[in-house]
């Protein structure tokens, strides 16, 4: 799992119940992972991932994200200002972003 921001030392992760929140004190962030990593998080009790920046937040339901995907599929979530972009494999999957 890789989280990219301009100041990597200030990025933080916190878990509250079944929600894992990645806080980035910047206006843009990129989160890179695989479906296998997301399944590992689900096995550890995480059901929802939230990427939060200064300009907004993006929420993913991990069950919906992983459904029908192979473990090796790459996942990239980009938060740019108030816009979010999600790709799974080579496909754009904005439909999987909760509350868009």
Image (spheres, rainbow, N blue to C red):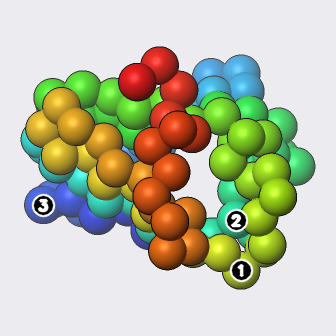
Question: Does 31 sit above or below residue 16?
Answer: below
Q: Earlier in the sequence, mark 1 or mark 3?
A: 3
Q: Which residue matches tag 1?
A: 72
Residue 65 location, x and y as percent? 67, 48
Q: Which residue matches tag 3?
A: 6
Instruction: State how far apart marks 2 and 1 are (Cα).
Output: 6 Å
Question: Does 25 sit above or below residue 75?
Answer: above
The reply to whether the C-beta atoms of the residues labelled 2 and 1 are less than 8 Å apart is yes
Left or right, 70 with respect to 1, comes to: right
Left or right, 60 with respect to 17, comes to: left
Q: Secondary structure at mark 1?
A: loop
Q: Nearer the viewer, mark 1 or mark 3?
A: 1
Q: Check the picture and name the quadrant holding the C terminus.
A: top left
> Residue at (56%, 73%) from the top-left corner?
89
| Dot 1 alpha-carbon crowd within 10 angstroms: few under 14, some 14 to 19, many 20 or more | few
Instruction: State how far apart marks 1 and 3 are (Cα).
Output: 27 Å
Question: Does 17 sit above or below residue 58?
Answer: above
Of all residues, the one furthest to the bottom in this rendering is 72
Q: Secondary structure at mark 2?
A: helix
Q: Which residue matches tag 2?
A: 35
> Residue at (15%, 59%) from the top-left corner?
7
Q: Which mark is residue 21?
A: none
| Dot 3 alpha-carbon crowd within 10 angstroms: few under 14, some 14 to 19, many 20 or more | few
Q: Does residue 21 appear in this view?
A: no
> Residue at (24%, 26%) from the top-left corner?
56
> Residue at (82%, 37%) from the top-left corner?
45
Question: Which quadrant holds residue 36?
Answer: bottom right
Left or right, 56 with respect to 22, comes to: left
């Amino acid at each position: 799992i890789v989280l990219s921001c301009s100041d990597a030392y200030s990025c933080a992760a916190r878990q509250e119940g079944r929600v894992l929140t990645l806080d980035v004190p910047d206006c843009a962030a990129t989160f890179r992972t695989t479906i296998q990593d997301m399944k590992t998080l689900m096995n550890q009790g995480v059901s929802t991932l939230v990427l939060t920046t200064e300009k907004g937040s993006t929420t993913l339901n991990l069950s919906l994200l992983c459904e029908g995907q192979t473990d090796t599929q790459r996942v990239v979530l980009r938060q740019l200002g108030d816009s979010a972009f999600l790709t799974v494999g080579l496909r754009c999957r904005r439909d999987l972003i909760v509350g868009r």
